[in-house]
Image: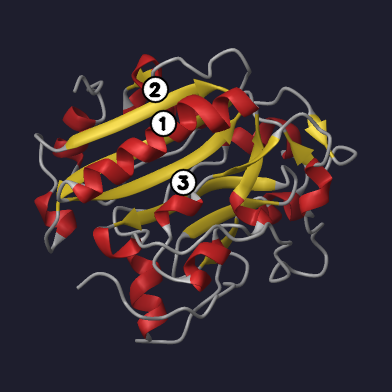
């Protein structure tokens, strides 16, 4: 049973943080990185290559029972968020309220919900509220600002939301998903330069029939969906399938490495393929 009844929010220390050994919280948080943690620093190198402290702050790993996030201080947003989505995650609790993530170190700027006010950009969830509706604590965790980046309304409320709904439809049809999402590039900033506005938002989704031993079940026939969506208005009614890409293409533009724990022979096939269903 993948869903473990633990609702304690955990902030993991910079780069080498730990959670209690053999705890239920550790079992749950590790699930969100079961296929491997995305790696790579290319997206930060050009802006911060000279600052070692920024290098560390740009790779601040937080693991929670609900998801894992690599947070970037210099971007003021997650570099990526990774989570598992199964049927037990879906319930009926109402949406929560946006909140500053007070678990960040005192030296970090802690993004506030009001930093987005009147900006023209939505507070865009990476792991969506709708993917964590089993308990109030689960849903509240998705509203922490370390899970949020600026999204154009037509992206967030249109094409991006349609893909989120499709993912939950896949789960209700008997599947479980491993999802990683984030933003790339820049088209400006908010909050006096503290929050980067990404030029694109991307997502990688691995689809498996519900079951056990997930990593061992991924093979060359496994469905993998990847998208790279412009973060702009004017696309609200564009089908999300328009922006499908291969995992290889998303890796090339983000500098990240996905599915790192999947065998190289399988990766070479599924990451080169563009989903066509």
Q: Which residue lies at the image location 46% right of the left edge and 38% below the top edge? A: 256
Element type at mark 1: helix
- Residue 166 relative to residue 69: left or right: left
Q: Determine whether, in the image, residue 144 is placed left or right of residue 8.
A: right
Question: Is disc 2 surrounded by few (<14), some (14 to 19) or many (20+) residues within 10 Å?
Answer: many
Q: Quadrant location of residue 231? A: top right
Give whichever of discs 3 and 2 has the lower sequence position. Answer: 3
| CA neighbours of label 3 inside 10 A, class few (<14), some (14 to 19), many (20+) | some
Whether 72 is drawn above or below 183: the answer is: below
**Mark positioned earlier in the residue sequence (3 or 1):** 3
Residue bearing mark 2: 240
- Mark nearer the N terminus (1 vs 2): 1
Q: Is residue 213 visible?
A: yes
Q: Position of residue 121 (x, y in %)?
A: 72, 32
Q: Does 153 sit left or right of 2 as displayed?
A: right
| Above or below, comparing residue 275 to residue 102 in the picture | above
Mark 1 and mark 2: span between their CA atoms?
7 Å
For residue 39, the mark is 3
* Labels 1 & 2 near each other (Cβ < 8 A): yes
> Spatial distance from mark 3 to mark 1, Cα to Cα?
28 Å
**Residue at image x 49%, y 22%?**
229
Q: Position of residue 227 (x, y in %)?
A: 40, 26
Task: Find disc 1 in the rendering and name its residue.
Answer: 162
1 vs 2, front mark: 1
Residue 88 position within the rendered picture, expressed as x and y whole percent measured from the top left: 28, 65
Q: Nearer the viewer, mark 3 or mark 1?
A: 1
- The residue lying at 77 percent from left, 41 percent from top is 195
The quarter of the picture where the N terminus appears is bottom left
> What SS does tag 2 mark?
helix
């Amino acid at each position: 049973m993948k869903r473990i009844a633990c609702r304690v929010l955990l902030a993991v220390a910079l780069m080498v943080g730990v959670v209690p050994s053999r705890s239920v919280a550790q079992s749950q948080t590790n699930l969100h990185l079961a296929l491997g943690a995305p790696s790579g620093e290319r997206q930060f190198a050009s802006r911060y290559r000279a600052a070692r402290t920024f290098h560390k702050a740009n790779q601040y790993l937080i693991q929670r029972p609900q998801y894992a996030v690599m947070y970037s201080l210099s971007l003021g947003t997650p570099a990526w968020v990774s989570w598992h989505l199964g049927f037990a995650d879906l319930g009926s609790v109402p949406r929560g309220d946006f909140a500053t993530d007070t678990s960040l170190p005192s030296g970090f700027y802690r993004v506030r919900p009001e930093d987005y006010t009147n900006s023209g950009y939505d507070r865009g969830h990476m792991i969506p509220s709708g993917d964590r509706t089993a308990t109030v604590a689960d849903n509240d965790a998705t509203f922490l600002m370390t899970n949020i980046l600026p999204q154009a309304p037509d992206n967030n409320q249109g094409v991006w939301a349609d893909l989120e709904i499709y993912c939950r439809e896949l789960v209700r049809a008997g599947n479980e998903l491993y999802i990683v999402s984030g933003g790339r590039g820049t088209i400006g900033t908010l909050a006096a330069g503290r929050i980067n506005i990404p030029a694109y938002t991307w997502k990688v989704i691995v689809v498996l029939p519900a079951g056990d031993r997930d990593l061992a079940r991924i093979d060359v026939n496994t469905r993998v969906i990847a998208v790279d969506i412009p973060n702009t208005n004017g696309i609200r009614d564009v089908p999300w399938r328009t922006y499908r890409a291969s995992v290889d293409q998303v890796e090339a533009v983000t500098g990240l490495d996905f599915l790192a724990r999947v065998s190289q022979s399988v990766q070479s096939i599924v990451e080169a393929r563009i989903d066509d269903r």
